[in-house]
Amino acid sequence: MLLAPDPDRLAAVERAWAHLTTAGPVLTADERHHVINEARRAWAGAESPGADSGVAGEATFWLAVDAEGLTAEVVAKFEAQGLDRLAYLEIVGVVGLLANVDFYMQGLGRELLALPEPCGDEPSGEIAADTEDGYLWVPSVGTPYAPTVLDALPSEGRALRDLHEPMYVDMSQIGNGHYADALTKAQIEWLAARTSYLNECFY
């Protein structure tokens, strides 16, 4: 049975998809398409990264299927193989946003959104001026936590929050224990915690 999606959530998913399929701050549009395809291969049951996927594809694959296994040492190995830390951070953002988009569509009983032809766009180069290195092995602005972990790449941080709020709770209501929509705040947080645990929400 097909479910009727919440209009605000569906609009947020459509905006996220448009963002995912164009160039980012570090990755070209073609590179982001490569990330999307590799993550979808992983979720479809592939046992290992594609033979020609390169270090970006390897990072994508393991982010999709074993995020908890990506330790500081593993990320350092990716960097030694030529994957810049900011490029890795962008891949984290693409995989995270894509997971929300793809699994939401699957939950509605719909087909995954089809990738358009790559547009050939080049990266914007937009990187936050106050980015710092080292904390939790990804570049960050201040101390990163879930809603701000991508803010070294401002467009990725904005895209995360643009999808985060309609799918979860408006940022202004995070600490409001009395907030409710169709669910109570306690029910929302239980579902969020359970989903995070099952999806190994680590970066």
Image (tube, rainbow, N blue to C red):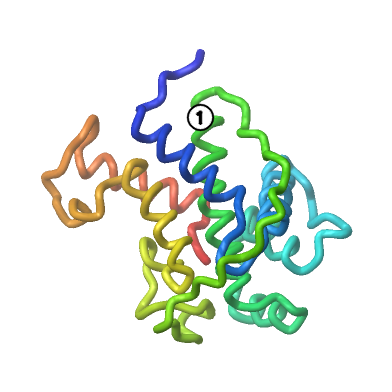
Q: Position of residue 170 (x, y in %)?
A: 25, 49
Residue 59 falls left or right of residue 143: right
Q: Residue at the location (66% across, 82% down)? A: 76
Residue drawn where x is 41% and y is 25% of the image: 5
Look at label 1 and name its amino acid.
Gly
Front one among 199 and 97: 97
Residue lying farthest to the top in this orientation: 1
Residue 154 point in image, percent of width and height:
43, 67
Identify the residue at image location x=29%, y=47%: 189
At 41% from the left and 35% from the top, the residue drawn is: 11
Task: Identify the residue at the far right of this view.
Answer: 51
In the figure, 126 relative to 196: above or below?
A: below
Is 82 situated above or below 18? Answer: below
**Depicted 177 relative to depicted 9: above or below:** below
Placement of 108 over or under 141, stated as above or below: above
Residue 19 left/right relative to 180: right
Residue 106: x %, y % from top left: 56, 30
Residue hosting label 1: 107
